[in-house]
C-alpha cells in the first residue's frame, strides 16, 4: 500500500507493507525519517540461541535495508518459558553491545511453536536530524521534528512477592522514576502495556485483574494526562491507551511510551468506540474500580495522525459477544477496531479530517487464549488485515470467556 501526501511540517507520510529476508514489515515514513515495524518468527528450528540470533539478524537486515544509520529502538520478546529469559537476555545483550534497544521479555508462548518471537521498532535516519539516546537500562528517547518519544520497558515491581495491588503500584512507581530520569513526566504517557500472570485468577476474595485496576485507579488520581496537548472538552478526564493481558506465571511486567514536545500543533485525543461503553465507565460487576484507559490514543502532529489502538476484544456495549466462537470473536474484535479508528469516529471526537481503515494499520499483536485456535484466528486476521507484521502469542484475556484480544498502531494524514 502506498499513500504519499505533502504536509507542511513533515514533508510526506508514506506507508509501505513489504516482505524481505523471510518476514513481513511495515515502513512508515514521516518526512524523511523511516519507522520500520517488524514481527520476526525464527525461520529455523534449533536451540534458543539459534532461534534468537536468527530473529535478531533478520530484523537487523530489514532495518539496515532502510537506511545507512538504522537503529532498533525497542523490541518485545515473546518467549515460551520464563526460565529462558536470563539466557535470552544475555544473547540479545551480546548481539547489540552498548546499543541495546528497550527490550521487554514477555512470558507468552508464540503460537507458531518457536522458542520466541520478536516485535521490533527501528528508526532509520534520513536527511532530517534524528537523535537517539540510550538512558540507562531499558529507556530510549528518539527525537526528531521537535518531538521526543520516550520508550520504557521491562518495568517490574521492587517486591514481586507482594500483593497484586502493591506490586502494581510499585511497578507504576518504577515507571514514573524511569520517565523522570529521561526528563519526562508520568502524565506525558500516551500508551501502556500491563502484563499480569494468572490475570483472571483469584486474589483473596477478588480477582487479580480487578486488583490491578484498583492500583491503576489510585496511582493515576494525581495526574492529568495530556496536559496542554489534550484535544478534549474542558473537564474531560484523559487516560492513555493500554493493553492489560495475561502471561505465564504470576508476575507483573509493564512498559510505556510517552511524548514530550513544545510544539503547538501537537494534539492528543483519546478515542472511545461508538460500539462500546468506555472502559472507565464499566459497571462495578466487571471491576469495583474500572479500567482507566482509552480505547485508543490519537496523536496528531501537524497533519499526521498516529493512533495507538488499545487491547480490543469481542465486546459491544459492555457485554462479551460470540461466547465459545473464536472466529466470531475475532471478526467482532476487528469490527470494533475498524469502528474505533474510522473517519466517522474521528468526526465524533471533533477531529477534523483523518481517520483510518484496517488497511492503515502498520503492525498488530494478536493474543489467543487457546493455542488450538491459532489457525482459525490467523486465517481471519490474514483475510482482513492482509500482509501485516503480526505477532501471535498465547495469552489469557481479562475475562474468562474472551478468547482473543488484538492491538495495533495506525497512521493517516489528517487532510
Image (cartoon, rainbow, N blue to C red):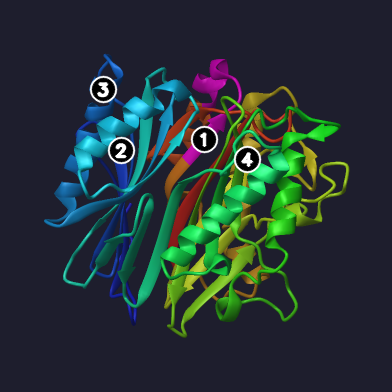
Disc 3 is placed on an element classified as helix
The answer to which of 22 and 167 lies nearer the viewer is 167
**368 is within the stretch colored magenta:** yes
Q: Which residue is mark 1?
A: 366
Q: Which residue is mark 2?
A: 24
Q: Residue at x 82, y 42 (%)?
A: 286
The answer to which of 27 and 70 lies nearer the viewer is 70
Front of the two marks 3 and 1: 3
Q: Residue at x 42, y 37 (%)?
A: 390
Where in the figure is residue 381, as x and y percent of width and height? Answer: 50, 34
Disc 3 to disc 4, C-alpha distance: 35 Å
Disc 4 to disc 1, C-alpha distance: 10 Å
Where in the figure is residue 204, as x and y percent of width and height? Answer: 82, 31
Q: Which residues are magenta?
A: 365-377
Disc 1 to disc 2, C-alpha distance: 15 Å
Q: Residue at x 70, y 69 (%)?
A: 222
Q: Residues within 10 Å of mark 1 (few under 14, many from 20)?
A: many
Front of the two marks 4 and 1: 1
Q: Which residue is mark 3?
A: 49
Circles 3 and 1: CB atoms closer than 8 Å: no
Q: Residues within 10 Å of mark 2 (few under 14, many from 20)?
A: some
Upstream in sequence: badge 3 or badge 1? 3
Specify whether residue 10 is in view.
yes
Upstream in sequence: badge 2 or badge 3? 2
Disc 2 to disc 3, C-alpha distance: 22 Å
Q: Residues within 10 Å of mark 3 (few under 14, many from 20)?
A: some
Disc 1 is placed on an element classified as strand
Amino acid at each position: 500500500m502506498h499513500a504519499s501526501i505533502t504536509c507542511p511540517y513533515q514533508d510526506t507520510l508514506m506507508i509501505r507493507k513489504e516482505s524481505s529476508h523471510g518476514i513481513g514489515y511495515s515502513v512508515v515514513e514521516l518526512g524523511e525519517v523511516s519507522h520500520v515495524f517488524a514481527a520476526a518468527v525464527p525461520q529455523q528450528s534449533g536451540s534458543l540461541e539459534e532461534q534468537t540470533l536468527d530473529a535478531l539478524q533478520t530484523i537487523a537486515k530489514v532495518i539496515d535495508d532502510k537506511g545507512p544509520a538504522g537503529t532498533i529502538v525497542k523490541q518485545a520478546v515473546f518467549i515460551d518459558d520464563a526460565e529462558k529469559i536470563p539466557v535470552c537476555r544475555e544473547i540479545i545483550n551480546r548481539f547489540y553491545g552498548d546499543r541495546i534497544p528497550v527490550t521487554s521479555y514477555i512470558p507468552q508462548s508464540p503460537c507458531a511453536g518457536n522458542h520466541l518471537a520478536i516485535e521490533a521498532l527501528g528508526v532509520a535516519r534520513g536527511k532530517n536530524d534524528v537523535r537517539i539516546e540510550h538512558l540507562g537500562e531499558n529507556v530510549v528517547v528518539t527525537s526528531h521534528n521537535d518531538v521526543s518519544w520516550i520508550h520504557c520497558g521491562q518495568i517490574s515491581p521492587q517486591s514481586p512477592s507482594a500483593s497484586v495491588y502493591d506490586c502494581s503500584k510499585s511497578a507504576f512507581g518504577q515507571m514514573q522514576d524511569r520517565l523522570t530520569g529521561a526528563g519526562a513526566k508520568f502524565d506525558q504517557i500516551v500508551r501502556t502495556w500491563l502484563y499480569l500472570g494468572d490475570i483472571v485468577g483469584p486474589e483473596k476474595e477478588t480477582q487479580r485483574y480487578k486488583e490491578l485496576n484498583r492500583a491503576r485507579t489510585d496511582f493515576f488520581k494525581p495526574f492529568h494526562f495530556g496536559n496542554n496537548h489534550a484535544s478534549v472538552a474542558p473537564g474531560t478526564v484523559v487516560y492513555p491507551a493500554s493493553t492489560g493481558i495475561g502471561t505465564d506465571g504470576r508476575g507483573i511486567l509493564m512498559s510505556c511510551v510517552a511524548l514530550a514536545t513544545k510544539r503547538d500543533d501537537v494534539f492528543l485525543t483519546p478515542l472511545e468506540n461508538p460500539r462500546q461503553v468506555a472502559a472507565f465507565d464499566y459497571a462495578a460487576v466487571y471491576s469495583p474500580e474500572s479500567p482507566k484507559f482509552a480505547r485508543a490514543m490519537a496523536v496528531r502532529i501537524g497533519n499526521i495522525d498516529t493512533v495507538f489502538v488499545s487491547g480490543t476484544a469481542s465486546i459491544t456495549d459492555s457485554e462479551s459477544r460470540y461466547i465459545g466462537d473464536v472466529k466470531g470473536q475475532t471478526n467482532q474484535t476487528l469490527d470494533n477496531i475498524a469502528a474505533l479508528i474510522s473517519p466517522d469516529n474521528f468526526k465524533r471526537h471533533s477531529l477534523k479530517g483523518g481517520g483510518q481503515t484496517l488497511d492503515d494499520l502498520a503492525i498488530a499483536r494478536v493474543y489467543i487464549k487457546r493455542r488450538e485456535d491459532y489457525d482459525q484466528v490467523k486465517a481471519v486476521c490474514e483475510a482482513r488485515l492482509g500482509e501485516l507484521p503480526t505477532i501471535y502469542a498465547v495469552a489469557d484475556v481479562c475475562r474468562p470467556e474472551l478468547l482473543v484480544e488484538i492491538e495495533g498502531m495506525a497512521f493517516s494524514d489528517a487532510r
